[in-house]
Amino acid sequence: MKIYSNNLPAILANQFDFTENKFDKDIKLALQYEYLFNEETTTLFKVLGVPVIGYVRLDKVLQSIVLEKFNITTPKTYFNKTDNTPFRGIQQFDSYCDLTEFIVKPYVGARGIGVKKINRKEYKKMLENPEKEVNKLYSSELEEQAIHSPDTDKYYVESAFRNGSMVVQEYLDIKKEFRLLCFPNEYLIYERRKQDGQLLGNLSHGSIPMDVAKEFCRDHLEEPLISRVREMMKYFNYPWLSLDVYIDNQFNIGILEFQMEFAYEGFNPKDVRECMERSIKGFIK
């Protein structure tokens, strides 16, 4: 039995017999990881009756639309609804958003890079002159990232402003944050305890992972949040999802964003690998 994949998660590399030959007759499952198969490959597996799981990474606008479709609470996201893209000019921005202060984040990105609370005046300046204003507004972040991870982080921040590719979200007073790994029949979770001065919890930037009581998960997260997440997973054939969960000062529980690819920091890698294995085996006919 073999599994076809176009982009293999490293943690699973030695757990299954993976192949990149889509014509191998022993293929029993196909895994899309961050990238979709082309139409020819998808059609081939459909004809052969090979289940295809996984989905492409969604941008922040599409994530907000999907979360709302499945009645999952998420911060209100502002964008150009004509074509579901970030604002590319002041007139577009003024047409959809009247907030004085809000959060901006890269249209496509990860690890909390580029997420910042700004005001209306600052955002309009960035729309007018993104190259100049991003370096001014993010000067301290760019200096820190130049030391710790210059290539990846600088790319996320600078590319976020090219062609107006920054998403606007309402600002929430978030009291608690969690990283949730959700699988069809189980989940892993920890609380991300923010350090003083942090807008969002991020382990790579000094946040601390904290255990979460089973009773809290049972009473506050499993219903309806995790149940609705699993409905979403089933719809897209996700074998797992990494989700940033929050609780605000009104005790509203929601999701900031989600994706298949994730960092293992804060979790026991053995637990993660075994959950991923069980999930994949559950899709094999």
Image (spheres, grey):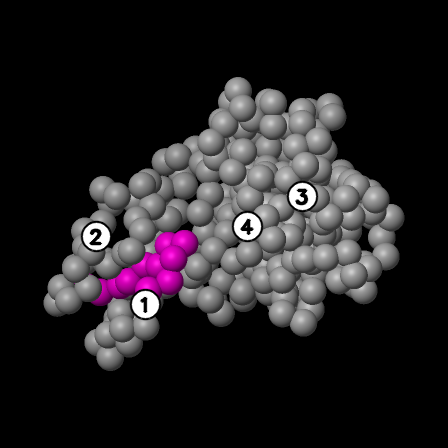
Which label is found at residue 108? Answer: 4
Q: Please say if 203 is above or below 238.
A: above
C-beta proximity under 8 Å, tags 2 and 4: no
Mark earlier in primary sequence (3, 1)? 1
**Gap in angstroms between the C-alphas marked 2 and 1:** 18 Å
Q: Nearer the viewer, mark 2 or mark 4?
A: 4
The answer to whether residue 142 is visible is yes
Please tell me how crowded label 2 is: few (under 14), some (14-19), or many (20+) other residues with Cα within 10 Å.
many
Of the pair 187 and 160, the residue shown nearer to us: 160
Query: Nearest the camera: 199 or 70?
Result: 199
Whichever of callouts 2 and 3 sits on the residue coming sooner in the sequence is: 2
Q: Is residue 165 left or right of residue 188?
A: right
Q: Which residue is mark 1?
A: 38
Q: At numbered mark 3, what does the secondary structure look like: helix, strand or loop?
A: helix
Q: Nearer the viewer, mark 2 or mark 3?
A: 3
Quadrant occupied by the N terminus:
bottom left
Which of pointers 3 and 4 indicates the residue nearer the eye?
3
Location of residue 95 in the rendering, given as x and y in whole percent from the top left corner: 81, 64
Given the current orientation, which residue lies at the most extreme left position? 25
Cα distance in 3D space between marks 4 and 1: 21 Å
Label 3 to label 4, Cα distance in Å? 17 Å
Write down the region rendered in magenta.
Answer: 26-37
Q: Secondary structure at mark 4?
A: loop
* Mark 4 burial class by Cα count in 10 Å: few <14, some 14-19, many 20+: some
Instruction: Determine which residue is flagged by label 2.
Output: 18
- In primary-sequence order, the first of circles 2 and 1 is 2
Q: Secondary structure at mark 1?
A: loop
Q: Are marks 3 and 4 in contact (CB under 8 Å)?
A: no
